[in-house]
Amino acid sequence: MIPYGRQDIRPEDIEAVVETLQSDYLTQGPKIPEFEAAVAKAAGAPHCVAANSATSALHIACRALDLGPGDLMWTSPITFVASANVGHLCGADVDFVDIEPGTFNLSATALADKLAQAKKAGRLPKIIMPVHMCGQSADMDAIGSLAREFGISVIEDASHAIGGRFGNRPVGDCQHSDITVFSFHPVKIVTTAEGGAATTQDPRLAQRMELFRSHGVTRDETLYEGASHGPWYYQQVELGLNYRMTDLQAALGVAQMARLDEYVARRNALADRYDRLLGDLPLDRPERLDRAYSAFHLYVIRVDGARRRQVFDHLRANGIGANVHYIPVHTQPYWRRFGFDDGQFPVAENYYARAISIPLYPTMSEDDQDTVVRVLTEALA
Ligand SMILES: *Cc1c(COP(=O)(O)O)cnc(C)c1O
């Protein structure tokens, strides 16, 4: 089976993890700040907070921005469920903004319309969470300027997009957002097995995310209410959880981050090659924005909706690990309980009816890619 994605583990990764296993710290040691510095540097942001998953990082990002009961968060319906879930976990209401048909990213035009209506109705969102689908940045110039106009915070779910750029700025520099979150799950661009990180330009947000990552407990005296009892003292000043990454994971992450540019370049070379090889087939290729350099986590084609199942089955039956990203979140049973229904976000639903993710990962050979193209050609014949 040629999978849709897979990790690349090299001897230096294994050495880095073994070295940490033999060191004094399995967690909360020196590898965490080293990994955070590597992510901050790649993202072009001054602060980075690592966590045990992107879901955790999204959750502490929402908490740091004070999302709570009575508040509203908007995200894209075409994302992994975690993007929406963290809003509900904070007690907020969640709603969605439809996508652009070509890039599958939250549409700035749809956002502008929905914001105008929300303003009239007197219920603006506190947070907007665009998702950089497949690794290509959403239009952050437009989304950022709308957010500023309406006084709304922005969290970028960049789980797919580390190493990508938008208008010559790295994804994650938070030029047009408060916080950007990355995922290091094995199918993503670089991996820590499980892991995530949040970048920000705001030291106060970074400090609050660190608090929520670790029980709301601090040893920083400047955050204390009242005096310290002595050198053993710590204070709980917020309600938090244990969302910490281990040093084993961070050691793997540091080794992987050294190859970030190589991985993204390879993904782009394979995506360019797909663009050429698939040019004559009856399918839609992903739209590429001139302003964006995608990290190419996924390569999604769209076929005739009436034939999607047959094409998908043919791929799977012939050793191609095709997949579908994503089932629109608002159509999931959990979200239907809150009144969401089919037909509410038609561009997203039409996308879902036609989408197939085909294999793309940095160690994929051109031979494997040719096999994917051959089987896909048969399926569409
Ligand atoms: C993978 C992913 C997540 C969750 O990441 P984890 O690290 O598995 O928690 C969230 N949002 C999107 C868009 C993702 O692809």
Image: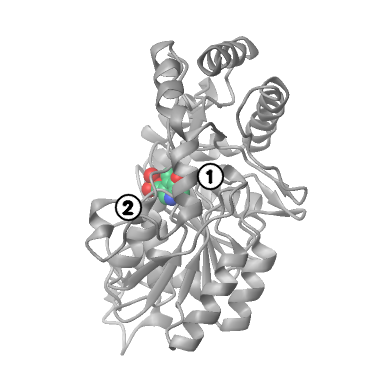
Which of label 1 and label 2 is nearer to you?
A: 2
Residue 347: x and y in percent read 51, 52
Residue 145: x and y in percent read 66, 74
Question: Residue type at mark 2?
Answer: Thr
Residue depicted at x 56% and y 53%: 105
Give left or right: position of 103 versus 332: right
Question: Residue type at mark 1?
Answer: His
Secondary structure category for the residue under label 2: helix
Q: Decide: marks 1, 2 in contact (CB < 8 A)? A: no
**C-alpha span from label 1 to label 2:** 22 Å
Tag 2 or tag 1, which sits nearer the N-term?
1
Q: In the rendered image, which residue does mark 2 sit on?
A: 331
Q: Quadrant of residue 265?
A: top right
Q: Is residue 196 visible?
A: no
Residue 33: x and y in percent read 50, 53
Within 8 Å: ligand 1 and the Cβ of disc 1? yes
Q: As rendered, which of 145 and 35 lies closer to the eye?
A: 145
**Mark carried by residue 303:** none
Q: In the rendered image, which residue does mark 1 sit on?
A: 160
Residue 199: x and y in percent read 55, 60
Look at the image and tell me in which quarter the C terminus lies.
Answer: top right
Residue depicted at x 59% and y 75%: 147
Residue depicted at x 46% and y 71%: 207
